[in-house]
């Protein structure tokens, strides 16, 4: 059963590598991971002895065209991968299979040694979930299908012109975003080691920014809507109920350089799940919230990775934490429209997985 899902995930990687094949140099990577789970809540089971082990396979295209370089002042690796992890407790936590898309910019192309950051997002299938009778200790996951986010930084050493050794550290997050409870989500850190191989020797031209500075647009603007869903559990006198969470964000950004934006904005949230909880508790409190945002957006071609730090300025119903984070991966359609997925978290605790869409100028 597990190997069937691994096969489907690898098929996803091969399919995406074909879809993303509008680049110069195809590259493949395989790596082994070893690490541990972060216990970010007292309600989680004791996990000090648990060790995470796994492997990751990726397929990507290394882009060296001037068009791609002008979009980010770097040489991006854009591709897909599948990560398989064993959480060290087959009866309670099981394992997960995680197909994902990623972007990894190669900023300084010269020499044999490189530092390469990578951001990825995708889906996760977890084999063991919470069950009040058979698996009450697993409050990490309550649904087999969840979301997967990864931030990775690696050191890559060139063995030959096509073969590289790679070692690094990854921060990984698996959560259903609060669609089903309980859902504490899992954060785990792994050390990784593996090999990266190019099917053809990359020829990397050197470009300059002198001819581009006059065309740079320093100020940019965006408006975005988002949607999510949380489920209120059945209780005495109340049935199970879906609660929509939706809102909008308006922000402005300053380019430093063009592919990197420092942003500020304002967010409005209407939380129908919170409204249901307040009604059940007999509290007549406003379920709407407003927050101020500061953040950063990194753009690589049509893909963008967004990080925001939010502070509530209007929250009549006390939030789990006065500050929170947004992480989002979006894809631009044409010049102005974009859509994607995101995560809202209060420190290490995931609250929502989001579907985003918007317009940028």
Image (cartoon, rainbow, N blue to C red):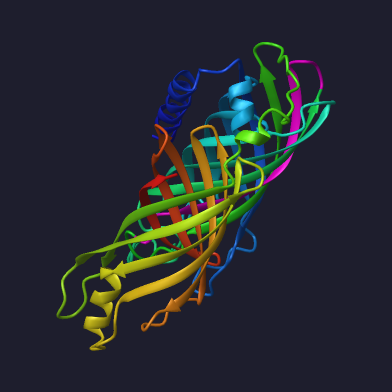
Residue 126 % position (x, y) = 43, 47
Residue furthest to the top in view is 200
* Residue at point 32%, 57% (across, down): 228
Q: In this view, does 300 lie to the left or right of 315?
A: right
Residue 266 colored in magenta in the image: no
Report the number of numbered marks.
Answer: 0
Q: In this view, does 7 lie to the left or right of 274?
A: right
Q: Give the residues drawn in magenta, as a range.
A: 159-178
Q: Which of 248 and 115 is in front in this view?
A: 248
Q: Is there any visible trace of residue 127 in the rendered image?
A: no
* Residue at point 39%, 53% (across, down): 223
Residue 147 % position (x, y) = 43, 48
Which quadrant of the view contains residue 202? Answer: top right
Q: Which of 219 and 83 is in front in this view?
A: 219
* Quadrant in which the C terminus appears: top left
Residue 66 % position (x, y) = 63, 21
Above or below, 347 relative to 2: below
Which quadrant of the view contains residue 57? Answer: top right
* Residue at point 34%, 65% (across, down): 181
Q: Is residue 326 left or right of residue 198?
A: left
Residue 164 % position (x, y) = 75, 24
* Residue at point 72%, 14% (across, down): 203
Magenta segment's dominant SS is strand
* Quadrant in which the N terminus appears: top left
């Amino acid at each position: 059963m597990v190997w069937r899902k691994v096969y489907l995930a690898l098929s996803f990687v091969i399919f995406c590598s074909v879809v993303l094949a509008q680049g110069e140099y195809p590259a493949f990577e395989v790596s082994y991971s070893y690490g541990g789970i972060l216990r970010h809540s007292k309600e989680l089971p004791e996990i000090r002895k648990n060790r995470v082990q796994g492997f990751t396979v990726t397929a990507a295209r290394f882009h060296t065209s001037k068009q791609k370089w002008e979009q980010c002042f770097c040489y991006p690796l854009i591709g897909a991968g599948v990560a398989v992890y064993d959480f060290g407790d087959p009866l309670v936590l099981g394992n997960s299979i995680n197909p994902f898309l990623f972007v990894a910019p190669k900023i300084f192309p010269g020499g044999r040694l490189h530092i390469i950051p990578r951001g990825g997002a995708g889906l996760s299938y977890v084999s063991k979930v919470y069950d009040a009778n058979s698996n009450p200790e697993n409050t990490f996951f309550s649904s087999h299908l969840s979301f997967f986010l990864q931030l990775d930084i690696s050191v890559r050493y060139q063995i030959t012109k096509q073969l590289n050794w790679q070692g690094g550290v990854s921060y990984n997050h698996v959560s259903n975003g609060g669609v089903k409870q309980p859902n504490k989500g899992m954060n785990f850190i792994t050390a990784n080691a593996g090999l990266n191989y190019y099917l053809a020797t990359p020829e990397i031209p050197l470009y300059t920014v002198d001819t581009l500075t006059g065309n740079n647009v320093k100020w940019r603007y965006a408006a975005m809507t988002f949607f999510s869903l949380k489920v209120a559990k059945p209780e005495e006198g109340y049935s199970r109920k879906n609660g929509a969470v939706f809102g909008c964000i308006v922000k402005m950004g300053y380019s430093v350089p063009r592919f990197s934006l420092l942003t500020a904005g304002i967010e409005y949230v209407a939380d129908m799940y919170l409204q249901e909880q307040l009604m059940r508790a007999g509290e007549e409190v406003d379920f709407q919230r407003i927050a101020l945002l500061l953040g950063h957006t990194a753009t690589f071609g049509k893909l963008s990775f967004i990080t925001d730090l939010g502070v509530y300025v209007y929250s009549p119903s006390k939030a789990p934490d006065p500050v929170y984070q947004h992480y989002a991966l979006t894809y631009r359609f044409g010049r102005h429209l974009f859509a994607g997925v995101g995560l809202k978290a209060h420190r290490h605790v995931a609250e929502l997985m989001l579907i985003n869409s918007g317009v940028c100028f």
